[in-house]
Image (cartoon, coloured by chain):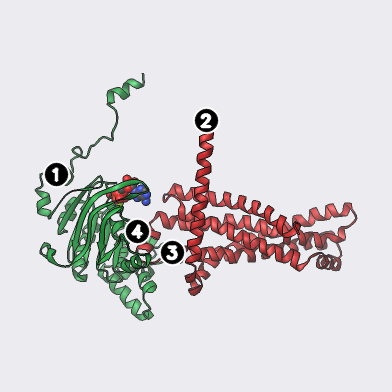
Chain colours: A green, B red
Amino acid sequence: MAQCVTERLVASLSGVDAGYGTRQILHGIDFTVHRGQVVAIMGGSGSGKTTLLRLMTGQLRPWSGAVEVLGVRLEQASEAQRYALRRRIGMLFQFGALFTDLDVFENVAFPLREHTRLPEPLIRDLVLLKLEAVGLRGAARLRTSELSGGMARRVALARAIALDPELILYDEPFAGLDPISLATIGTLIRRLNDALGAASVVVTHDVVESLALVDYVYFVSRGRIVAHGTPDEIRNASDPYVRQFVRGEIDGPAPFHYPAPPLAEALMEGQ
Amino acid sequence: MIEAVARLGRATIDAVVQLGLAARFVIALLHHSGMTFRRLPLLIRDLYFAGVLSILIIVVSGAFVGLVLGLQGYDTLQRFGSETALGGVVALSLLRELGPVVAALLFASRAGSAMTAEIGLMKATEQLDAMDVMAVNPIARVIAPKFWAGVIAMPLLAAIFSAVGILGGWFIGVVVIGVDHGTFWSQMQNAVDFEEDVRNGVVKSLIFGVIVTWIAVFQGWSCTPTAEGVSRAITKTVVFGALAVLAADFVLTAFLFIGR
Ligand SMILES: Nc1ncnc2c1ncn2[C@@H]1O[C@H](COP(=O)(O)OP(=O)(O)O)[C@@H](O)[C@H]1O
Ligand SMILES: [Mg+2]
């Protein structure tokens, strides 16, 4: 899959700074995804991974730099343009974000009902096909409260691909899943990407699962891309931060201790 | 001392900022209200939750308020030997004040809090974000129907409250105490002016409906997206809603009934 790099560019960020209010989160981000690729963004909690996804959906505007997704320049796009673009993007939220007042079937039907005028029998067929793709056709009439974490994630995935998106974004799709559900989601991400001829961006800190799955990896630390490469390059990387992350060591460039004055000083204060 | 002043200043600035955000929010809401009226099932769903589910508490409270009005009204009126005026007193109290105000207070705590909770939970579980990313504007799809449902339901609920309250006053006055049946109703008919009393009461409850529902949807929309944030927003809806209704009632009474 990595050979597809010369193919069509789906999303690119170049020299992007971004943040919330006056607080800068991302610094000089350069990032590209091509059609057919599954790209992982790895990094610790709070390093700005979700923020990066929000730039690609146009939920957040960059302070500077260029964000181009599916040919749309997002830093200057109007609300109508952003909404038009989002119909071509599917996103899986961290805990699924299924609509709690709708059942499984209606959740998957939601984008179809909102954006198309298809007759009811056709909507039904499409929804069942999408549910079949994630192995949950039999669960169509369950309520969202009856789903396990892994099933909810799969329903959300079926909803995300309801309109056959060209770009699929995953925010921590593996978080909190048992090993079987985790492997299922991993396989689905790869399979759906290839079946739809789409591009996928997977935000994760699950190293083993994602290195086996993806074509390319970006490492983010404190709002900067500190390393990137193919899974093989990442496994053999010499960068200390990447090594710490890949091997799961607790102390290293990413410190175990929250910044604090020396312990001795703190103990003396109590006296 | 300086610190207290600084804190007061900060609180004032925060309050003004919140007001500004609420104003901007309601403008966006009005701007995106088209879908509410083009897709009636959305509006009907929220009318059911805001209106129909509030009917029970409105009827029961209206009945008790009417019963008390009957007792207190009779007790006071008979001191002046004018217990025949009971029908007018009960009806005027309900139509002009108690109906709109008490119904609005009940509405804030029953329907308003439920709206805040639903919106806040959708925000905390990223359902609103998910909708936005699916290119469906959550203000148009979720917020505006709730707002309009509240605005429509409130005058109807206040009317039900007043009607049930009048029956309660009638029950105490006529059935229990023995005021003349015909006098009770004819007195009421004489005392109540359609323009001055009924219409102004409806205007009041319409405005209360706007205020309470606006507060409810704004608190849900702007809450901190955590369990704690949602529960704090619900409290704010009930407290701010009640205060705003009582303050607005004073202003409206001054303008609608007295200041002419
Ligand atoms: N809506 C927001 N408003 C303000 N700050 C935010 C918001 N969302 C995230 N942040 C902050 O931005 C930083 C990066 O967040 P995020 O992109 O969610 O990190 P990650 O997904 O890598 O855990 C965090 O410090 C977080 O507190
Ligand atoms: Mg995140």
Q: Please tell me whether residue A169 is drawn above or below residue B227 in the rendered image.
A: below
Q: Quadrant of the N terminus of chain B?
A: top right
Point out the frontmost of discs 3 and 4: 4
Question: Pointer 3: residues within 10 angstroms few (<14), some, or many (20+)?
Answer: few
Q: Position of residue A63 (x, y in %)?
A: 31, 52
The residue to which callout 3 is attached is: A101
Left or right of A103 in this view: A259: left
For badge 1, the amino acid type reads Arg
At 46% across and 56% down in the image, what residue appears? Answer: B221
Q: Give the amino acid at mark 4.
A: Gln
Judged from the image, the secondary structure of the residue bearing numbered disc 1 is helix
Residue A243, numbered circle: 1
Picture disc at residue B2? 2
Q: Is residue A157 something one can see in this rendering? A: no
Task: Let me know if marks 2 and 3 both belong to one chain.
Answer: no
Give the spatial CA distance, label 2 vs label 4.
41 Å
Residue A211 appears in the picture as rendered: yes
Q: CA distance from mark 1 to mark 3?
A: 44 Å
